[in-house]
Amino acid sequence: MRYCSKCGSDQIEFKVPADDNLKRYICSACDSIFYTNPNLIVGTICIKDERVLLCKRNIEPRFGRWTLPAGFMENAETLQEGALRETKEETQASPKIISPYTAFSLTHISQVHFFYLADLGDEEFGPTSESSEVKLFKKDEIPWDEIAFPTVTKTLEYYFDDVISGKFPFREEALKLW
């Protein structure tokens, strides 16, 4: 941070404020403290007859890799609204949320990835500017070595294990990838 977004000053310091324990950006001119919080990524695992909807990324990061439809949550939207918006933006699909399914804390990159289990309903989906391909996959058809993100791999593995048991519990865990 180079300039204060409140007063415009360039008198920004990175230090621990009084009564805090983490370094924060602080404007010496107006005493504003700026907190940096994790990014929230929201998405869906859309299912249809034990198949899952994946999209091939047409954007970075991980261009050309397969993923569940997901992306950064926006201000002024709920988790579900963000997940459905991202699904629509990446696949043109309009699924119905069933339940929360997985949540992963990735502290090393200050992100939380949250996926909902969703019913695809009709099979109206297709590529968008963000996805070059969108397809339904059975477990044995998934290009496992071309999955974009570890949280997507884990969510898919959980789903196909849950299909066997018939139970789809919510899972929350921390992942350390590096």
Image (spheres, rainbow, N blue to C red):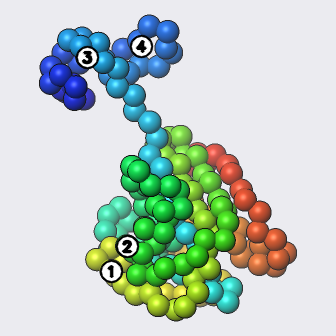
Q: Say which residue appears at 42% left-offset and 79% top-offset.
A: 91
Q: Which residue is mark 2?
A: 89
Q: Which residue is mark 1?
A: 128
- State which mark lies toward you, 3 or 4: 3
First in sequence: mark 2 vs mark 3: 3
First in sequence: mark 1 vs mark 4: 4
Q: Amino acid at mark 2?
A: Glu
Q: Secondary structure at mark 2?
A: helix
Q: Which residue is mark 4?
A: 16
Mark 3 surroundings: few (<14), some (14-19) or many (≥20) residues within 10 A: many
Q: Furthest-right residue in view?
A: 165
Q: Amino acid at mark 3?
A: Cys
Q: Secondary structure at mark 3?
A: strand
Q: Say which residue appears at 48% left-offset and 50% top-offset.
A: 40
Label placed on residue 84: none
- State which mark lies toward you, 2 or 4: 2
**Quadrant where the image shows the N terminus:** top left
